[in-house]
Amino acid sequence: MLIKQNEVKEMASSEALLPVLFREEPLSHSRSESMPETHRRRPIKVHLAVILLLIALYVTLIVTHDGSARDTANEKADESRVRLSGLSEKSNVQETEAFPWNNTVLSWQRTAFHFQPEKNWMNGPLFYKGWYHLFYHYNPNGAVWSDIVWGHAVSKDLIHWLHLPLAMVPDQWYDATGVWTGSATFLDDGSLVMLYTGSTDKFVQVQNLAYPEYPSDPLLLKWTKFSGNPVLVPPPGIGEKDFRDPTTAWKTSAGKWRITIRSKVNRTGISLVYDTTDFKTYEKLDTLLHQVPDTGMWECIDFYLVSKTEENGLDSSVNGPDVKHIIKASMDDTRIDHYCHWDTFYDQHKRRRILWGWIGESDSEAADGIPRTVVLDTKTGKNLVQWPVEEIELLRLNSSKFDMKVEPGMVVPVDVGPAAQLDIEAEFEIKKEDVEMVPGDDSVEAEDDFSCETSRGSTVSGALGPFGFSVLSDESLSEQTPVYFYVSKGKDSKLNTFFCTDTLRSTMANDAVKSIYGSFVPVLKGEKLTMKILVDHSIVEGFGQGGRTCSTSRVFPTKAIYGATKLYLFNNALNATVTASFKVWQINSANIHHYSADDLGALLLAPDFFYKLNIVPSR
């Protein structure tokens, strides 16, 4: 069944492997970019010299193999932009003069609690022996789609991250021009295998098998590529460059493992299906998992299950009458859904399905959205509800609570202090008498009769909206990013509600992408309008009606930065008074740390060499 996204044995020593960083100080008006110091325990005495030597050799092999310690002497010392911090000038998407970006502005745009590689692209996660692992696309040689390797980071809580050496590099003929998207599968005995797309020396897309070189290593520092790679090549009728992105495998009733790989035939997007018993040999099924005409090439297919009766997530091999099957694909032709990178994994540690996505922007850098749980909305029976993982609350600092009545046309400043890192949860009610006085519009019969994208944004007033928050605003409101509800009263006086984000005034820069987007959100009888917003410098994530619909924005303020960042509540409705009850938390920065070869050697000597990461911020 296809549902749209909008509707829609741990080692005893693994804790000892936890590296230690001190918590960052609560936020101030001036953001600090400094990295907290690390403290380590005293070294073990000389009688472990042999072990230390072996560890040093192992780490040296890792670092030299993946290229993470490459010589950087050729980097330009006078580089005009902060590429090394993962940001750069924006693509000049319009034929206009480029904005004069500088390091002061760009440094502020660096996210504080969203994971972001030093530069370039993101990929996918898994949970293994007590650690969450994030593997991501990364080009160590520049911000272009070339020389793609797998970066690697680990976390205990999905919030604080440690960068590790590169996990996979293009060092064989079958992945010589890129190690592309892959998916992990846990076998019945708990072992782990990874299927990934390689781009060969002749740019043919093939599927390859890899597995941990040391399965007992919770950090998964080294991977072994199967000597018989590639295990799959494009079948007859499929283009050499149209065969990629294998899914996590699931178990069939016949006891076989099944995967799907996305492709296309002419303009029809398809998902090919293969069965295997050993992940080395495969049988192609004659039937397709799904196909949709006129969609072009599909990207990053995701296939998983949700429960119709529980909030717990499900492993992909579960079956029965109380589950729904979800297939998701992004369209290469339109690049909707930020090209392809909203994928899920099953967190067996907490029995939840976690969705994780790449947040694109108008240059070649990217960041990850906050991980979200995804469940079926049992109230509507057809929406997938997305909500930030509970661990994000570990970063909450001081909070402020507000109850405000906002008349039509009002814009109200909300005094929360620094407004660059916020968690906002709000309820809205439209005055009942105002709703009743607004006549129904016979031309508005269904949710499809209104579009956030074509509505001209939050400044265009209707009888019952828009109203919501302007985040990342400067005092003059010359820069602002409104996140809001728009309510229309259609035929038979039926109310239709939309959840939108307007980035048209998010920056003074003329070379950044600026648009309006959002969607219809179901509101059941008796429900208040609710929204949650996460603000992290250049990222704004919105969740409407408990996550029935979501929006994610990458914006680039030039004036609403540092101490000039403000928060406003607004009501641009013509005829409706709105009551808003909301709470705003300041959000601390996450600890995201890079480790040297010496640190990795210490990690591998656990429990005698280890650090403790203080992951609970002061409140």
Image (cartoon, rainbow, N blue to C red):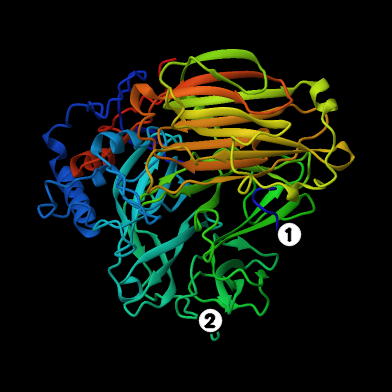
Answer with left or right where residue 58 lies relative to residue 562.
Answer: left
Residue reaching furthest bottom?
236
| Residue 393: % across, % down | 51, 26
Kind of residue sitting beneath label 1: Met
Instruction: For residue 311, say whether it is visible.
Output: no
Label 1 belongs to which residue? 1
| Residue 116: % across, % down | 37, 43
State whether residue 266 is above or below residue 612. Answer: below
State whether residue 605 is above or below residue 293. Answer: above
Instruction: For residue 44, say whether it is visible.
Output: yes
Circle 1 — which element? loop
The disc, 2 or 1, on the residue closer to the chain's N-terminal end is 1
Seen at 76% across and 54% down, the residue is 320
Q: Quadrant of the C terminus?
A: top left
Foreground: 407 or 27? 407
Label 2 belongs to which residue? 238
